[in-house]
Image (cartoon, rainbow, N blue to C red):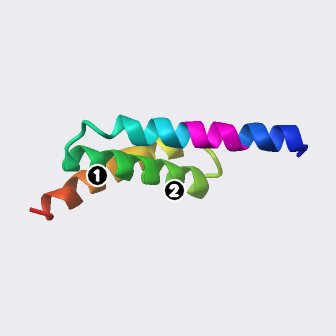
Amino acid sequence: MTSVSTHRAAWLAASVLFLGLSACSGMSGRQQDTAVGAGVGALGGAILTGGSGVGTVGGAAVGAVIGNEVSKDKK
């Protein structure tokens, strides 16, 4: 990877992180837990299935359900 493409990748990652964090500002704790669960599940599903779209979506769905259920126990 060249220096220019590394620089662009770093800026893209920082922008995605900033936008992702700012999107959660108006959410309740339960909604945030659900969103985080979906993100972690999507990543896990993608890794476990070698990048399969079905595995990624399935992982996101399972992660969202788990994140939602975990947030019920916090009260």
Pinpoint residue 27: horizontal percent, then vertical percent.
24, 39
Which residue lies at the image location 70% right of the left edge and 44% below the top edge?
Answer: 10
**Residue range corresponding to the magenta coloring:** 10-15
Outermost residue on the left side: it is 75
* Among the two numbered marks 2 and 1 on one chain, the one whose residue lies closer to the N terminus: 1
Which residue lies at the image location 57% right of the left edge and 36% below the top edge?
Answer: 15
Q: Residues within 10 Å of mark 1 (few under 14, many from 20)?
A: many
Q: Which mark is residue 73?
A: none
Mark whose residue sits in front, 2 or 1: 1
Q: Are marks 2 and 1 in contact (CB under 8 Å)?
A: no
Q: Which mark is residue 44?
A: 2
Q: Is residue 17 magenta?
A: no
SS state under label 2: helix
Outermost residue on the right side: it is 2
Pinpoint residue 7: horizontal percent, then vertical percent.
78, 41
> What's the residue type where badge 2 is placed?
Gly
Residue under numbered circle 1: 33
Q: Residues within 10 Å of mark 2 (few under 14, many from 20)?
A: some
Pinpoint residue 66: horizontal percent, then vertical percent.
29, 56
Pinpoint residue 40: horizontal percent, then vertical percent.
45, 54
Q: Is residue 40 left or right of residue 46?
A: left
Q: Is residue 21 above or below residue 37?
A: above
Which residue lies at the image location 33% right of the left edge and 40% below the top edge?
Answer: 24
Count the numbered circles shown: 2
